[in-house]
Each structure stands twice: as C-alpha cells, then as structure tokens.
Image: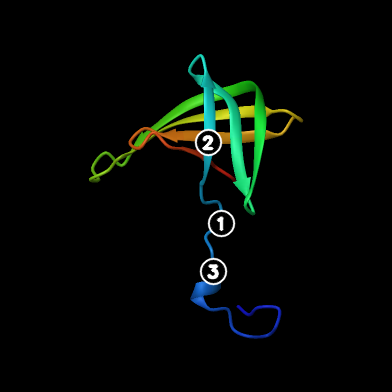
Amino acid sequence: MESTAGAPLRAHGLRALGQPRPVEVALEGGRPARVTVERSRVARVFEVEGVQEVWRVAEAWWREVPVRRTYYQVVVDGGRALTLFQDEESGRWYEQRY
C-alpha cells in the first residue's frame, strides 16, 4: 500500500478503524441525558432525545480483565444516532463508531 505521495505507508502512519472514543456522559434517571464529544480539540455537547436500545456484553471471562459493557443506542438532538457504552470495569464512557 502506498500513500498519495508515492512513498510507502509506514507503520507509524497507520491507525485502527472503529476504535472506541472516550466521551463524557451526564445521566438522568440512570440513562444518558447529555453526551460531550471532543473532536479535533473542539468539544460538542449533544442532548439525548431518546434511547432506542440497551444491551449488555459480558465476554472473555477467562482473561485477567474480562469485557463487561453496557451499550446504549441513543438519538441526539438533530436526529443523529450514537452508540455509547460504559465499561463496567473502569466506569468510563465511550462512543463506538462503526
């Protein structure tokens, strides 16, 4: 694979796609009410208009740190859908982009 300049693409120029991004989530009644997303050093706050779906993932129980997450498919102001999850081990929130 080569870059547009014709130079070979180096490992330091690669990035994983679809990696979860940290976000801040304010809860009301135990559910997401506001989401703060930082992109390019600019923070945007979205009001959650509704929660479409909630599900839990508990896997890799055999590992030292198993994966336990609660996912929320939400609709924010403007009609945009976001998939959020809270890591139950750390308590941190992330946006999962597909």
Instruction: Mark 3: give few (<14), some (14-19) or many (20+) Cα within 10 Å.
Output: few
Q: Return the disc, 1 or 2, that comes first in the chain's sequence.
A: 1
Q: Residue at x 54, y 42 (%)?
A: 96
Residue 87 rendering spot, x and y as whole percentages? 40, 36
Gap between marks 3 and 1 measured at Cα? 9 Å
Between residue 93 and residue 57, name the one nearer to us.
93
- Indicate the quadrant containing the N terminus: top left, top right, bottom left or bottom right: bottom right
Name which residue type carries label 1: Leu
Between residue 39 and residue 57, name the one nearer to us.
39
CB of mark 2 within 8 Å of CB of mark 3?
no
Question: Which residue, given by chain and number where applicable, does mark 3 sit on?
Answer: 14
Q: Return the disc, 2 or 3, that comes first in the chain's sequence.
A: 3
Gap between marks 2 and 3 measured at Cα? 26 Å
Q: How many marks?
A: 3
Question: Which residue, given by chain and number where applicable, does mark 1 sit on?
Answer: 17
The residue lying furthest to the bottom in this view is: 7
